[in-house]
Image (cartoon, rainbow, N blue to C red):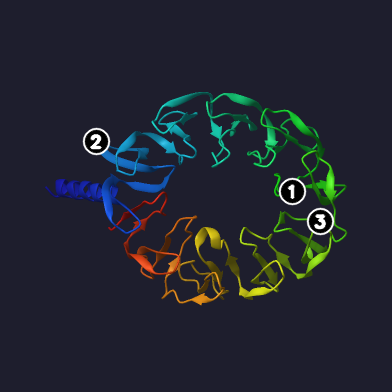
Amino acid sequence: MKFFKTLFALFFLTNVFAANKTWQIIDESGNVKTTVEAKYAYAFSDGLARIKTQEYKNNEWVTGEGYIDASGKIVIPCIYDKTANFVDGRAWVRKKGEKKYTLIDKSGNEIPTKGYTKVGYIMEGYSDRIAVYENGAMGWINRDGEEIIPCKYLGSSTFDQEFGLACVMPYDAQTEKYGFINKEGALVIPYQYKQAGTSSFHNGVCRAAVNGKTVMINDKGEVVFSSKHGSLQRLNAGLMAVPTKPNRLGWGFVNMKDEMVIPAEYDYVSSFNIDSLAVVEKGGLKGLINTKGELLIEMKYETIYCDYSEDGYICGVLPTEEPMSLLKTPKDYYNRDFQIIDMNGYTLSAADGENLIPFMTSDAKRGFMNRNFEVVIPAKYVKSTNFNGGYAIVREN
């Protein structure tokens, strides 16, 4: 009898800890739209969310991944062992027991391809060419699964949105020299660069190494800008970061006239972001400047996260003597006026361009606040996804 009691107890515990949980789909007011039974749920993307389910069938646990819509309906069955978010109406999945990935649409219809054991990410706005791989070499298919460019390259997996070019080199090349191909696979800029910087065009130019120095080239491969101060970084907000001293020190910013607009006095700088802000560092501590070189946030942080437009705040992580988890590490949060906001001990997460900012309390409960830092949905969840398209998926226990 003791054996059977032990066996029952083990079975009960297995069911408790391995079975599906009840998740809620909520709107931006915190209203519950419906519930979903799943082992795990992921954020919505392109109108669908991935879920992983686990059921006990024929004396074994059976797991699978599929997709639900905002009503909680399973629109693509949980028959896959690997799934990816839908982007621009396409997603890669892999069936159980198979090595090759399948491309599907939002109805779950399979889109025929040659079959690839390695595939690239599908990126929003770039889905007309999707990277695929054969024997380590990269090529591209279109949205209909047709291989437009054969798998024979190394380099960038995406084509830039300005000129439709990708920086690549032949997989079997004897020397490391990169060039640029267009979306049909035609070589537009010859293989002549040992390195091409960020490997994509941005604001009309691309970084490339010429005679050991990083310069800016145009879409014809012509050098359009070179600085007397040093090797250039990406062009943003009309400025480029440049190191002026050995060992990549003495960083400042130049304009397209090669004028040193922001003095070369930093140990490190980032490029200016979409908000025209850049992180600068001296003596191991970081601060934040604008395009005039004005110090907006004091240089006292170990790390600064500054994607305000995307996330709704700027975060400065203070240095500590001992390593700590991000949840416990002391940090400051800044609003758009670069004023510190009292977060009452909350830890904020990235909003990913959505209206609501996820936050977590000291006891790891999750909730959401708006971009005025007012709590809209109280912290009562043990698990939550980000909002996307007006919905998030959460779990209370």
Question: Are the residues flagged by discs 3 and 2 in contact, CB closer than 8 Å?
Answer: no
* Upstream in sequence: badge 1 or badge 2: 2
Mark 1 to mark 2: distance in Å?
Answer: 55 Å
Crowding at mark 2 (Cα within 10 Å: few <14, some 14-19, many 20+): few
Residue 354 position (above or below residue 278): above
Mark 3: secondary structure: loop
Marker count (numbered): 3
Relative placement, left or right, of 352 versus 197 is left
- Find the distance from the CA under tag 3 to the CA under tag 1: 10 Å
Q: Quadrant of residue 381?
A: bottom left
- Residue located 51% across and 60% down the image: 311
Q: Amino acid at mark 1?
A: Gly
Comes first in the chain, label 3 or label 1: 1
Q: Quadrant of the C terminus?
A: bottom left
At numbered mark 2, what does the secondary structure look like: helix, strand or loop? loop
Label 2 is placed on what type of residue? Asn
Is residue 380 shown to the viewer in this render? yes
The residue at the point 65 percent across, 27 percent down is 149
- Residue 386 in the image, given as x and y percentages of width and height: 42, 54
Q: Position of residue 19 (x, y in %)?
A: 27, 46
As drawn, the label of residue 59 is 2
Label 3 crowd bin: few (<14), some (14–19), many (20+), radius 10 Å: many
Q: Which residue is mark 3?
A: 231
Mark 3 and mark 2: Cα distance apart in space: 64 Å
x then y, percent, for residue 21: 27, 49
Q: Locate residue 280, reporting x and y percent.
A: 68, 68
Q: Is residue 247 visible?
A: no
Q: Secondary structure at mark 1?
A: loop
Q: Which residue is mark 1?
A: 197
Q: Is residue 189 above or below residue 3?
A: above
Label 3 vs 2, first from the N-terminus: 2
